[in-house]
Amino acid sequence: MSTPAFTLIGFGPEGWGKLLLLAAGLTLVAAVCSFALGSLLGAAGAALKLASSRSLRGIGTFYTTVFRGIPEILVVYLFYFGGSLALTRLMHLAGFPGFFSLPSFIIGVVAIGLVSGAYQTEAYRSAYLRLERGQIEAGKACGMSSFVLLWRVIAPQTLRFALPALGNIWQSVLKETALLSIIGLVELLRQSTIASGATRQPLLFYGVAALLYLVMGQITALGIRTVEKRLARCWGR
Amino acid sequence: MEPIQSATGALSASPVISATGLTKRYGALHVLRGVDLDAHEGEVISILGASGSGKSTFLRCLNLLEVPSGGTLNVLGEDVRFRMKGAERQIADARQVNRLRSQVGMVFQNFCLWSHRTVLQNVMEGPVHVQGRNRHEVREEAEKALDRVGLLNRADYYPSQLSGGQQQRVAIARAIVMRPRVLLFDEPTSALDPELVGEVLKVMQDLAAEGRTMLIVTHEMAFARDVSSRVVFLEKGTVRVQGTPQDLFKGGMDERFDRFVSHFSRQG
């Protein structure tokens, strides 16, 4: 209790402020990457689940069932150990003995991205089902190719309908990045743990971490709400 | 019957749209049982019929929103190409169909404006993103089209901020700005409150007076009688009778048609 709390979380030589902010930045980057990957997978998953072919729908359903049904922490473990094992085998075959692990950032982003993609699949799919069929027909009737129709009519409207659900998914992705601390990525939670251990002030640092998560979440939520409000104008609400 | 003279006075040689023996079935349900129709340039054809007669389905076949199960379809001098997939007929050449659709305007019962775009954007969408025309030129033309339907002062509104009649007039502007060779109207006033029907019919009457080729599925008997050059009466998926409105509406040509008309006039 020799050093005051303010100094510990400050930016001086004894302060952890800079490291915590950097770690928060890494959390944000990991969340953005995971969410972006999840968006691509979600769009593809929704396309699969909406396909007319039964086998394609089956693949989509398999994907969402598996990744929504397994605890995230388990997905992270499976990818981390599974990926490392595969890489180690591969390296052995290539004549490099020893243990090789994949970069935890990549593994983490892929794992969380896959899980978030499964949830985004449902968000996009249900948003697509809310589109007015007539507006799609109007696009066809004026000669739009499937690509133009998708890009100019279907995608913007689906996105607008999916936005509230996507906002929720983004919030949970931001929090789930904390799981990456268990595979060694020094993001916000891991950095707070390190600082707690070094200073024996866990409450202080976990409190600061909680605050930083809240701030990041609230600022982005505010942004999403603003976009939502602007878009709602077109739908007369 | 003789091709009708267009407003320009020219007698067009080949029809703009020609359907021969068009059929459409959904499983066991035969909606169209062989419809023949030639639409020549400048003709304004009203397609009448009770609900379930197949009139909307027929119109939707003409721009391939429905794929006809049988028969041939020639649009703007091109035979639409189909291919079989199992027992089902499909469009063989999507590029051909898209090209033809861009020259065939369509106005829907429920307006179907794109709700995420403003009125002006709705009107500019097709010319810019389908026909690839210059945005500035299109803007001018779109504003002219909106002015024509009396809605230039609503250019920056979203469809949800407009009345049904206004939305339908925007939809008409959206169709004509594509410079279509023919316009299809699928019950354009059926979804409107009675007091808004007139403003839409007036715009359509203007278009007809310009010599545009139009096919209109409608329940507006007065419009069919006064504005169209030909009336086609569908019943159970076939053309029961057709002719000039003068001949048909004076009665005595077809008993079923007369009963259909009197039923509507009773309704007011």
Image (cartoon, rainbow, N blue to C red):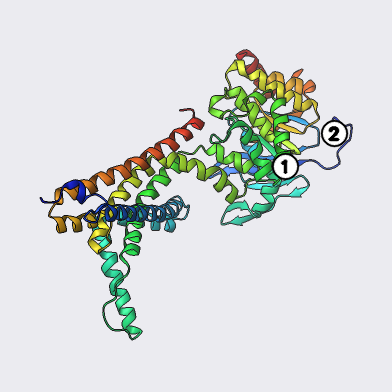
- Residue under mark 2: which chain is it in? B
Is residue B170 visible to us here?
A: yes
Residue B23 image-quadrant placement: top right
Residue A81's place in the image compared with A112, above or below, is below
Is residue B236 visible to us here?
A: no
From this viewpoint, which residue is outermost toward the left? Answer: A1
- Residue B103 numbered mark, or none: 1
Quadrant where the C terminus of chain A sits is top left
The structure residue drawn at horizontal position 62% and vertical position 49%, both measured from the top left corner, is A145
Residue B190's place in the image compared with A92, above or below, is above
Whole-percent x, y for residue B223 in the image: 71, 21
The structure residue drawn at horizontal position 30% and vertical position 77%, both measured from the top left corner, is A88
Mark 2: few/some/many CA within 10 Å (<14, 14-19, 20+): few
Q: Is B181 placed left or right of A86 in the picture?
A: right
Residue A73 image-quadrant placement: bottom left
**Is disc 1 on the same chain as disc 2?**
yes
For badge 1, the amino acid type reads: Gln
Q: Name the residue under label 2.
A: B2
Q: Is A77 placed left or right of B204 in the picture?
A: left
Q: Is A180 placed left or right of A147 in the picture?
A: left
Front position in the image: B79 or A22: A22
Whole-percent x, y for residue A207 in the image: 19, 46
Mark 1: few/some/many CA within 10 Å (<14, 14-19, 20+): many
